Image: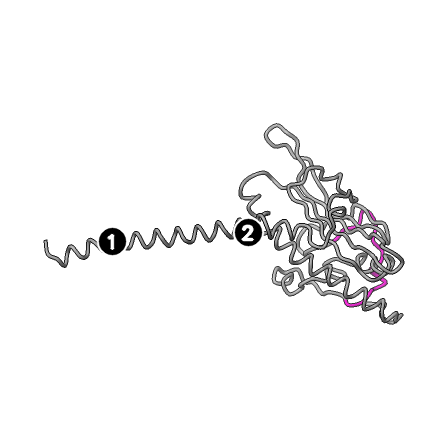
Amino acid sequence: MTEESLGRKEEKPMRIGKVGWALGKAAAVGAVAVGAYAFALRPWHLKWGATSEEVNRDLPGDDLVPNPDHQATHAITINASPARVWPWLAQIGQNRGGFYSYSWLENLAGCEIHNADHVVPEWQTIRTGDVLWLHPRETPLPVLFAEPDRALVVGGATPVEFEGATEVEGGTWCFFLEPVDEHKTRLIVRIRWSRKPGFRSRFYDYFLLEPAHFVMERKMLLGIKGRVEALAESSAPQAIRAA
């Protein structure tokens, strides 16, 4: 056996060792990233802007999903009364005023959303039993509760049988207006849902749906705040106009 052939045989274990070291390093980095998300980032984004009292209080619609797999409570202070905030909530929807979020991302998914920059009188009527469209080709969410200047709840939950037990599948999305004083309002938004059990479903919720929802909803709250306060400061009647 020549020295050249011995050299070739020695190269293989070295390559395997390098691959193993790289995989080990990648696994370590992944574990750190997962840990950072689970113990730092996720607890922060699930209650962004909300106080402990707001996170723990009961809101309309909570009883429909009594034991959710996921709950997020987000909140923001708006320098205006609930009566000035409500018109912007009343007109949310894919075929109405949009969601005041990243419409370019929503439209990449075919949502065909155009965010309104004014209050439209024709979109101000919203009642229990109406529907809220998220996507033009998907089933809309039923309006479960609507109290002007106070609360809007959409969604729905259905009892399902799983391994001999009855569980709830579905969720609710609540928009709640809490007056601070005559000129300030806390807009509290809560989403609760339960999905089919299983690793794939939980993985999807935990690492994809939850952070995506946070990014879009945070922008939504900031979008509502900006629109309400701009209109409140201007106090211009012409800012409320037809579409």
Amino acid type, mark 2? Ala
Total marks drawn? 2
Picture quadrant where residue 157 is located = top right
What residue span does the magenta drawing correspond to?
A: 117-132
Which residue appears at 19% of the width and 56% of the height?
Answer: 8
| Residue 210 shows in the view | yes
Rendered image quadrant of residue 110: bottom right
Along the horizontal axis of the image, is 8 left or right of 159? left
Mark in the foreground, 2 or 1: 2
Determine if the magenta segment contains residue 118: yes
Give the percent coordinates (x, y) of residue 171.
Answer: 69, 44
| Secondary element at tag 1 | helix
**Residue displayed at 71% across by 37% down:** 66
Above or below, comparing residue 12 to residue 69 in the picture? below
- Which of the labelled discs sits on residue 12, or is there none? 1
82 sits left or right of 2 in the view: right
Q: Position of residue 68 (x, y in %)?
A: 67, 40
Q: Could you tell me what secondary structure mostly forms the magenta stretch?
A: loop
Labels 2 & 1 near each other (Cβ < 8 A): no
For marks 2 and 1, give the CA distance: 36 Å
Residue lying furthest top in this view? Answer: 164
Q: Which amino acid type is shown beneath numbered disc 1?
A: Lys
Judging depth in this view, the residue of 67 and 144 nearest the camera is 67
Reply yes or no: does residue 70 show up in magenta: no
Q: Nearer the viewer, residue 23 or 132?
A: 23
Which class describes the residues within 10 Å of circle 1: few (<14), some (14-19), or many (20+)? few
Question: Going from the N terminus, do you reach mark 2 or mark 1 first?
Answer: 1
Residue, x 74% and y 51% (percent of image)? 189
Horizontal and vertical percent position of residue 134: 70, 55
Q: Which residue is mark 2?
A: 36
